[in-house]
Amino acid sequence: MTRHFLSLMDLAPAELAAVLARAIELKAMLRRGEVYEPLRNKILAMIFDKSSTRTRVSFEAGMTQLGGNCMFLSPRDTQLGRGEPLEDTARVLSRMVDVIVIRTHEHAKIETFARHSRVPVINALTDMYHPCQLLADIQTFIEHRGAIRDCTAAWVGDGNNVCHSWMNAARQFGFTLRLATPKGYEPDAALLTACAAHVQPVASPAEAVRAADVVVTDTWASMGQEDEKAQRLKDFAGYRVDAPLMKLAHKDALFMHCLPAYRGMEVDAAVIDGPQSVVWDEAENRLHAQKALLEFLLVTR
Ligand code: CP
Ligand code: NVA
């Protein structure tokens, strides 16, 4: 059966752990200059309905390093943009390429695509989830602090796609996630219920962050929410991760952000550019974690 990676729940906890251990190995191999090309003659197609810097570049660079090839398909230049059904596009592309990476709006779209694809489909961000980001984030935590099991993470800000993937990570990796989101910006209610054993909504950023091992935030206005920006600026007052808030966390707490970041909005420069921030490692680890994921989907299993 074709395996997809549409959310962190598509891999078992042991498989996720193996992918991350492998990501750390692949990173060391790359640093040593070892050439490792198990994906020679394999082709990855990417469909992006939204902008991207990290995700696109990390998949292209990673696939190339693994010996494979990549093609970037803009909806503007393909028949998708002219209304060819997703199902038909999935059927056609998956007869030609070996793996498909998609960034789009509705999560249902990527699910539909995957149902009609013969080859693995990887979620490169939907309005609901950003699972590749969490592979990199958990890898980053492990590299800096060791196992994340039984640790406490604090999410401060919008209950968005990245937040939803942190919620799934909490149950898959066995840590506690405290959530501080403004009224009206809570995460998906059904997901909250499903994650109840590991995810605790709290009343304020201070409560979320107290003694936490890692503090995480993201933009207050995700792609597609540009029109709401002014309103959101008002509604998120008090939710900025600044130095006084970080002080409440564990003294060795890490600061994470998937990027792109908006300094002076969701995070102060003193925090994101400060000593506790590991945001550049997170960004780099997109490359290593996704290479491990590609190897898992195309070679290992
Ligand atoms: N974090 C992340 O996915 O960044 P891009 O939007 O640049 O891909
Ligand atoms: N929440 C952000 C993440 C970008 C990587 C967005 O969806 O725009």
Image (cartoon, rainbow, N blue to C red):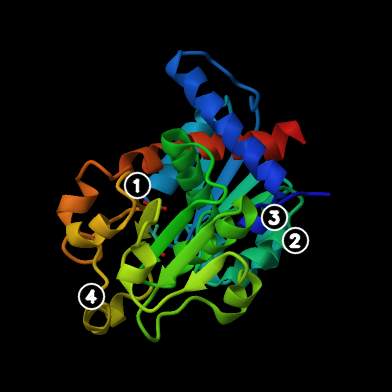
Amino acid type at image mark 2: His
- Label 1 belongs to which residue? 254
Which residue in the protein does label 4 denote?
Answer: 238
In terms of depth relative to the viewer, which is nearer, 136 or 98?
136
Image point 67% across, 58% down: which residue?
A: 9
Above or below residue 183? Residue 9 is above
Q: Which mark is residue 205?
A: none
How far apart, in angstroms, are the residues tagged by discs 1 and 3?
27 Å
Q: CA distance from mark 2 to mark 4?
A: 45 Å
Q: Label 3 belongs to which residue? A: 10
Which comes sooner in the sequence, label 1 or label 4?
Answer: 4
Mark 3 / mark 2, whichever is N-terminal: 3
Q: Position of residue 121 (x, y in %)?
A: 65, 52
Amino acid type at circle 1 is Leu
Gap between marks 3 and 4 measured at Cα: 35 Å
- The residue pinned by badge 2 equals 116
Residue 135 % position (x, y): 53, 46
How far is disc 3 from disc 2 in space, using C-alphas? 17 Å
